[in-house]
Amino acid sequence: MLTCKQATKVMSQAQDRPLSLKERINLRLHLMMCSGCTQFEKQMRFIRSACNRLGGG
C-alpha cells in the first residue's frame, strides 16, 4: 500500500510519463481509501485542464 507521500509522487510522475500497471493499481487502491489524495488528484486534473485551455500545455 502506498503512503500519501508516495501516491502524490506517482500522481505527479503520471503527468510526465505513462505509469506501469503496478503503479496504476497501487495508486487506484490508495485513492479508493484516501479522500485527501483523491482531492489532490482532482485538483491536479483541474489545473492541467485549465492550463491546456489557456494554451500553456
Image (spheres, helix red, strand yellow):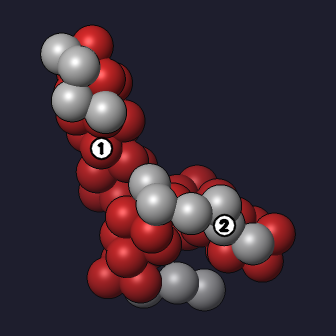
Label 2 sits on a secondary structure element that is: loop
- Residue type highlighted by circle 2: Leu
Whole-percent x and y of residue 12?
Answer: 37, 64
Q: Is residue 27 left or right of residue 11?
A: right
Work out which quarter of the rendered image holds the N terminus and state it.
bottom right
Of mark 1 and mark 2, the one earlier in the sequence is 2
15, above or below 22, in the image: above
Task: State the residue lying farthest toward the top.
Answer: 53
Instruction: Determine which quarter of the picture holds residue 53.
Output: top left
- For the point 75% across and 72% down, the residue is 20
Whole-percent x and y of residue 7?
Answer: 44, 73
31, above or below 9, in the image: above
Work out which quarter of the rendered image holds the C terminus and state it.
top left
- Residue type highlighted by circle 1: Met
Q: Is residue 38 left or right of residue 17?
A: left
Whole-percent x and y of residue 39?
Answer: 31, 45
Q: Residue 19 bears which disc, if any? A: 2
11, above or below 51, in the image: below
**Can residue 28 be seen in the rendering of this structure?**
yes
Instruction: Determine which quarter of the picture holds residue 29.
Output: bottom right
43, above or below 30, in the image: above
Q: Which residue is mark 1?
A: 44
Whole-percent x and y of residue 36?
Answer: 29, 56
Mark-to-mark CA distance, 1 and 2 = 16 Å
Q: Is residue 20 left or right of residue 4?
A: right
